[in-house]
Amino acid sequence: MPFKSIKDAISNIESKKISIRELNLEFIKKIKDNKNLNIFIYFDEKKIINQIDNLEKDNSNKKLKGIPLAIKDLFCTKDMPTTAGSKILENFNPTYESFVTQKLINDGAIFVGKTNLDEFAMGSATDTSYFGNTINPLSKKDNPLAPGGSSGGSAAAVAADLCLGATGTDTGGSIRQPASFCGVVGIKPTYGLCSRWGIAAFASSLDQAGVFTNNVEDSSILLETIAGFDQRDSTSSNVNIPNYFDNLNDDLSGMTVGIPKEYTIDGMPEEINLIWEESKKVLENKGVKIKNISLPHTKYALPTYYIIAPAEASSNLARYDGVKYGFRANGISSLDEMYEQTRGEGFGKEVKRRILIGTYVLSAGYYDAYYLKAQKVRKLIANDFKEAFKECDFIVTPTAPSAAFPLNEKKQDPIKMYLNDVFTVPASLAGLPGISIPFGKDKNNLPLGIQILGKHFDEQLVFNVALSLERSSE
């Protein structure tokens, strides 16, 4: 106690072995004891107690009744601040609930707080937040480690046992990479499976909501809740959502796994190659055929991503100008000055960098050379996956090119930071589902993740493979 698994907590609440109140009070205590990790931007004990009071009066049978979850502070939550980790939204209190958080509320979940993130989800270490760095709970006292990013607060909250699950968003790896760094399970579903309505936008053609949990079964439970069609999101897909948990099956005999040669990169630690090899052996022993495949345009994925994502960000972030809501600079004498001062003071360094890159690649004379070309290359990357899936059922790769690195180590070199997404970005550009599960450790005993990628809307197989690998490493 408290439990590590949503499944166990649900059965113990249903059998009256523990009450919703007792369960959540344990987590409240743990959150208060771990404030030094700077995982939560917003935590209000009274608000949690109110949620418990309301659920105790509710006699309906809800799937996640009383389960404590943390919410990435990019999701709009009614009557709770939503900052996106930025000064510009420091005092923003939405009057509505995002699609994803509303679905969790409808199923009876309790929100224990809003987690820290890289500002507007732009980063790979949760070190660009206006509210300070989050520290990876696996750090030693004298060596604070990055939890990954941008959803580092959510991954850290699950790893530190401050909740039983958390929401995240993944634009180029922002769920899978922190899951790998913190030793938890993180899934980015197919683009369009979960509505983006009520999530502060970074790059609209890439952003996708997902979840962090301690195990694959719990991920399948939460994803089923947050998935679904939403008319308010024009990119939401109207597809049938299976019962992922009930359909879990770790029998993979007769299937084929694709191993892309392009994911073997120079300078990658030997331990990562070893866990990749180990995952192949495990799958082979389970009757899976190993197939070497090629994704030839992989090398163009990062530059393509870092043109498309900033371009969309520069457009999306134009709304933060001090006019309608959020921060407004003082001592201004004209409208132009208000825009300039507000954005100059309200946005952090990384966000400004990406807005400037995005504005540049969309500007007259450069649009065709950069943005249009990047969209064409994106299509080629997506086609690579389409061709590969004619030869295999799923793909297995490392999640990240390293284990968790020391906090602030790469802050001065944006390119080094961007390279963290080298294994996760291609699937984001193609809109494919991907999950990261902990699979082995490095020489410093830090977790390393394995990534499983599937065809569009084939989350069930992704979960099944993940479950099979998870059980083999227990």
Image: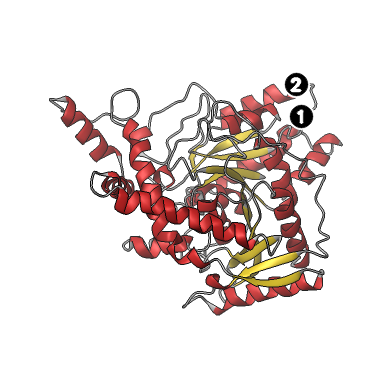
Residue 330 in the image, given as x and y percentages of width and height: 20, 29
The percent coordinates of residue 440 (x first, y second) are 65, 70
Measuring 82% from the left and 40% from the top, which residue is drawn there? Answer: 12
Q: Residue placed at 18% from the left, 25% from the top?
A: 335
Residue 151 makes an appearance in the image: yes
Task: Please name the amino acid that badge 1 sits on.
Answer: Lys
Amino acid beneath label 2? Asp
Residue 269 in the image: above or below residue 420: below
The answer to whether residue 97 is above or below residue 465 is above
Instruction: Give the number of the mark in front: 1 or 2.
Output: 1
Residue drawn at x 57%, y 28% as measured from the top left: 46
Q: Position of residue 206 (x, y in %)?
A: 49, 45
Residue in front for this viewpoint, 44 or 136: 136
Secondary structure under tag 1 reads loop
Position of 407 compared to 431: left or right? left
Badge 1 density bin: few <14, some 14–19, many ≥20, Cα 10 Å: some
- Which of 203/152 is in front? 203
Classify 10 Å Cα crowding around label 2: few (below 14), some (14-19), many (20 and above).
few
Q: Residue furthest left?
A: 333
Q: In the picture provided, is 296 more to the left or to the right than 247?
A: left
Q: Name the residue rendered at 77%, 67% in the picture.
A: 472
Q: CA distance from mark 1 to mark 2?
A: 9 Å
CB atoms of marks 1 and 2 within 8 Å: yes
**Residue that numbered label 2 is attached to:** 58
- Residue marked by disc 1: 62
